[in-house]
Amino acid sequence: MRLLFLGDIVGRPGRSAVIERLPGLRDRWQLDCVVINGENSAGGFGITEAICDEILNAGADAITLGNHSWDQRETLVFIERQPRLLRPVNYPAGTPGRGANLIDTRSGHRVLVVNVMGRLYMDPLDDPFAAVDRELETCPLGQVADAIIVDVHAEATSEKEAMGHHLDGRASLVVGTHTHVPTADHRVLPGGTAYMSDAGMCGDYDSVLGMQKEESIRRFLQKTPGTRLEPGLGEGTLSGIAVEADDRTGLAKRVAAVRLGPNLEETWPRFWD
Ligand SMILES: [Fe+2]
Ligand SMILES: [Fe+2]
């Protein structure tokens, strides 16, 4: 099984990069499941239903969110009718939408996708470790799910690494999102779970975390109110991780970073070409 996870889509440059490149990559790499974090896809803040549909139509099987889940108020409503859009599973009981779902992929596989948010330097939510444990217990890898992908939306690499090791052997991929900067620590953990502390973002890297540089810099120089942060205007780059998983066990066999587009050193899974 071939899995692709892409980090936070930021604004139009991120959306355009996904829409222009993903259909070709699905084809070229014969991808079985594609999951993308979409928490910044609407002008950097949240996601709309139209954008959600656009990303799914481009070839994503599921979309995850994070601390920007509700920046667009319409998400509180349409998430109830969109089973492929997931918000963090450790929000309080009664929060709209769902945090995990067993997704039927176009290739006929069943992939459990879980979105969870860390607590270090983030909003204090329910215990992310216990929340993911509950989801995996009801849907074990290699039995109910052909593959399991966990998006850990968190600030601290310590919390993300701890989650990776905690889930080692029980998930195909544990991947961090939220920092918008890709890390170089992608690997297969000893128990067979692919791991990467942060997938990076899909967006304009000639920016500060995907947003235009000028206002971002100004906010560090002057502590006075300024203008709204807007996404960069340059060409977007795709960033994430590719995983080849065993068809029987669902565990990872090999991983590669994916960075396609300007401003970052390009790389892709040579083992699929
Ligand atoms: Fe983000
Ligand atoms: Fe975030």
Image (cartoon, helix red, strand yellow):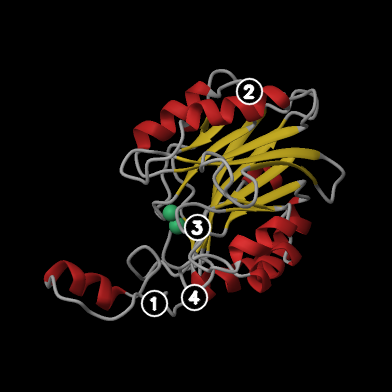
How far apart, in angstroms, are the residues tagged by discs 2 and 1? 39 Å
Work out whether mark 1 precedes mark 4 in sequence or the reverse, and give the earlier one: 1
Per the rendering, the mark at residue 266 is 3
What's under tag 1, amino acid-wise?
Answer: Glu
- Asked if one can make out residue 1 in the rendered structure from this viewpoint, the answer is no
What's under tag 2, amino acid-wise?
Answer: Arg
x, y percent for residue 63? 64, 54
Tell whether label 4 touches label 1 (CB within 8 Å). Answer: no
Instruction: Determine the secondary structure under disc 4.
Output: loop
**Quadrant in the picture for the N terminus:** top right
Within-10-Å neighbours for mark 1: few <14, some 14–19, many 20+:
some
Image quadrant where residue 162 sits: top left
Work out whether mark 1 precedes mark 3 in sequence or the reverse, and give the earlier one: 1
Instruction: Note whether 272 is above or below 17 in the view shown.
Output: above
Within-10-Å neighbours for mark 2: few <14, some 14–19, many 20+:
many
Instruction: Determine the secondary structure under disc 3.
Output: loop
Front one among 249 and 112: 112
How far apart, in angstroms, are the residues tagged by discs 4 and 3? 14 Å
Q: Nearer the viewer, mark 4 or mark 3?
A: 4
Relative horizontal placement of residue 34, taking residue 220 as reference (left or right): right
Tell whether label 2 touches label 4 (CB within 8 Å). Answer: no
Image quadrant where residue 41 sits: bottom right
Front one among 45 and 147: 45
How far apart, in angstroms, are the residues tagged by discs 4 and 2? 37 Å
Location of ligand 2 given as a quarter of the image: bottom left
- The residue that disc 4 covers is 235
- The residue that disc 2 covers is 170
Work out whether mark 2 precedes mark 1 in sequence or the reverse, and give the earlier one: 2
What's under tag 3, amino acid-wise?
Answer: Glu
x, y percent for residue 38? 56, 60
The residue that appears at 33% across and 78% down in the rendered structure is: 228
- The residue that disc 1 covers is 230
